[in-house]
Amino acid sequence: MTTHAIAALGGEFLLGGDLPVHRLGFGAMRLPVGTFDGAVRDPETGVAVLRRAVELGVDHIDTAWFYRRGGVAANDLIRRALAPYADGLVIATKVGPLLDDTGMPTGEAGPDGLRGLVEDNLRSLGVERLDLVYLRVGGMGAPGGASISDRFAALAELREEGLIRHLGVSNVDAAQLDEAVAIAPVAAVQNSFHVQDRGDAELLARCEKDGIAFVPFFPLGGGWRPIDQTRLAAVMERHGATASQIALAWLLETSPALLAIPGTGVLDHLEENMGAARIRLTPEDLAALED
């Protein structure tokens, strides 16, 4: 670890049983645009954020081909900033959503459409094999309600062909995870979860027991479940930390299977988020965060 590689202080997880990654990583969704209806961001800043993230010890980047807006695409920025990729850098991506005419992911690909989406990611990232591919299901709705067997089986075939190293599922319930693991090994689950959004605690416990990474999306409360910072105030004051830092420290403390992937397109926010790896929450802190 270098002097500046503070992400390593958050611990390590063996993703898929063979890919060691620091548990504090980086999500690329906010590189092209800060919010769903926000302005397109400067790609030069995105490149700088990615390079600084790696300098700070990030070796797990979560992205998707459909993270794009107005000609700025996360995968393109990752390739431009970081290729040729360093040994040990793990890039995870997601397939399933389809973009509408406005650039929003409002549709879902069927089994026959997943190969093309995987190939889009291979080309845009400039790799011959993807480290981890999630099947992202259900749009913006709650997990559950539809079988994922046919679509996950299609990805499993691409894994057998050597295009994918490990498979994951995103926005799923326990029954859908059951479907997936009956078809092929599942390395990671990516669901909504944060310090004030703990509805998937049982699924997290299952993942921890089975050696599956649990990778929360919106770990800082984005989307439809914001974090009430006033409920973190006492712990923030004790540590001289921000709400984002406490929320991330809580994830790292809660389970060794949790991998945090906070996203940002701003250098200052990146530095702030990475600072969470230095925080060690006490039993008193954890009790306060239960309120």
Image: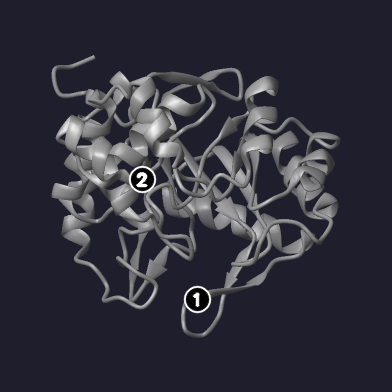
Give the left or right position of residue 133, taking residue 22 as reference: right
- The image position of residue 192, as x and y in percent, is 54, 51
Give the left or right position of residue 218, taking residue 284 as reference: right
Q: Residues within 10 Å of mark 2 (few under 14, many from 20)?
A: many
Between 249 and 33, the residue placed more toward the observer is 249
Q: Is residue 179 above or below residue 249?
A: below
- The image position of residue 257, as x and y in percent, is 54, 26
Which residue is identified by label 1? 104
Between 194 and 13, the residue placed more toward the observer is 194
Tell me the element at label 2. loop
The answer to whether any part of residue 24 appears in the image is no
Between 191 and 132, the residue placed more toward the observer is 191
| Residue at screen point 55% across, 80% down | 100
The quadrant holding residue 26 is: top left
Between 234 and 110, the residue placed more toward the observer is 234
Colour approach in the figure: one colour
Q: Is residue 77 above or below residue 51?
A: below
Whether residues under marks 2 and 1 lie with C-beta atoms below 8 angstroms apart, the answer is no
- The image position of residue 154, as x and y in percent, is 78, 49
The quadrant holding residue 33 is: bottom left
Which residue is identified by label 2? 262
